[in-house]
Image (cartoon, rainbow, N blue to C red):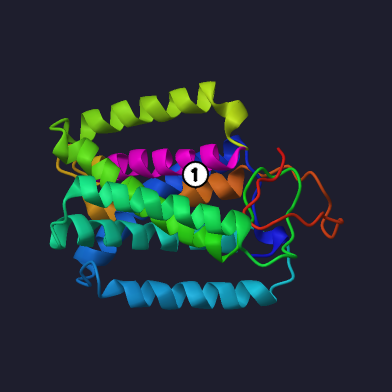
Amino acid sequence: MQNKHVPSSGPRYWIALSVASVFGANMGDFFARDLGLGHVKGLPILALILAVIFLVEHRDRFTHQAYYWLVIIVVRTAATNLADFAAGDMRLDKASLLAVLTVLLALIVFLGRFFAPAGLQSKPGNGLPVTDAYYWMAMLAAGTLGTVLGDISSFGSGLGTGRASIGLCALLGTWFYFGRGWLGALPCYWLTIVLVRTAGTAVGDYLAGRSLGLGLPLSTACTGLLFVAILMLWKEARGLPPGADRPVVPSGANRAS
């Protein structure tokens, strides 16, 4: 993904990503249930949408972040369905599934760090890894892992979606406060992504569930509108003007924040 289409790390990024995680969790369930696609039939459609987004993004020379956030939502939607398919439809052992997804995420991040093609550019000062193919595969793996963890926290622990949401949001807020200086480190970035996805899954299930009574369509619409409002109303301060020179760094390496 081109540098001009990638947001910078900071409060706006993490808050938008957290809301996107809730929205994506609802979108995944809406895709599977309300549209009647199930957890598998919708995946080719999501893959086609991703391909179109990347194709158009590659040719777009304007500076904006629409493509990044569109891909985040599509990937989050797919991760929800993949996790529900593996843990629900296939009834795979959750402990084994968590172990496999954790190893897979670590492997993708490792490969992205050391074996991605050279020459990819990184925008300094945004605090994100390079958004290449390895990045998006890692985002899908992290989203699937976070979804399984969120479901375990809500349903496997007996806490329910409400108490799990409170506990996970408190954990995420604590991590943001005490670990904010480490978010630029590659392992901490992906740990945070998993935590955001875990909390987002629980909150999404709570908003759409019977406890609150919003229902899945209304919850999806409300979280989607909130997500768009954050991006539209909270403008990002740019550190560099469009077209400024940017150094080349290895793919998957962290950008300094």
Q: Which residue is drawn at 16% across and 51% down?
A: 93
At which x and y percent is residue 92?
16, 56
Q: Which amino acid, mark 1?
A: Trp
Residue 7 visible from this viewpoint: yes
Q: Quadrant where the N terminus lies?
A: bottom right
Left or right, residue 124 beside residue 103:
right
Residue that mark 1 sits on: 190
Which contiguous range is marked in magenta? 185-205
**Relative to residue 96, is residue 251 depicted above or below?**
below
The quadrant where residue 63 appears: bottom right
Residue 222 visible from this viewpoint: no
**Is residue 22 one of those drawn in magenta?**
no
**Relative to residue 242, is residue 145 depicted above or below?**
above
Q: What element carries label 1?
A: helix
Left or right, residue 12 beside residue 228:
right
Q: Residue at x 74, y 52 (%)?
A: 123
- Binning the other alpha carbons within 10 Å of mark 1 as few (below 14), some (14 to 19) or many (20 upward) gives many
Q: Residue at x 22, y 32 (%)?
A: 162
Q: Quadrant where the C terminus lies?
A: top right
Left or right, residue 236 beside residue 28:
right
At which x and y percent is residue 241?
84, 52
The number of callouts visible is 1
Residue 74 or residue 179, whichever sits in front: 179
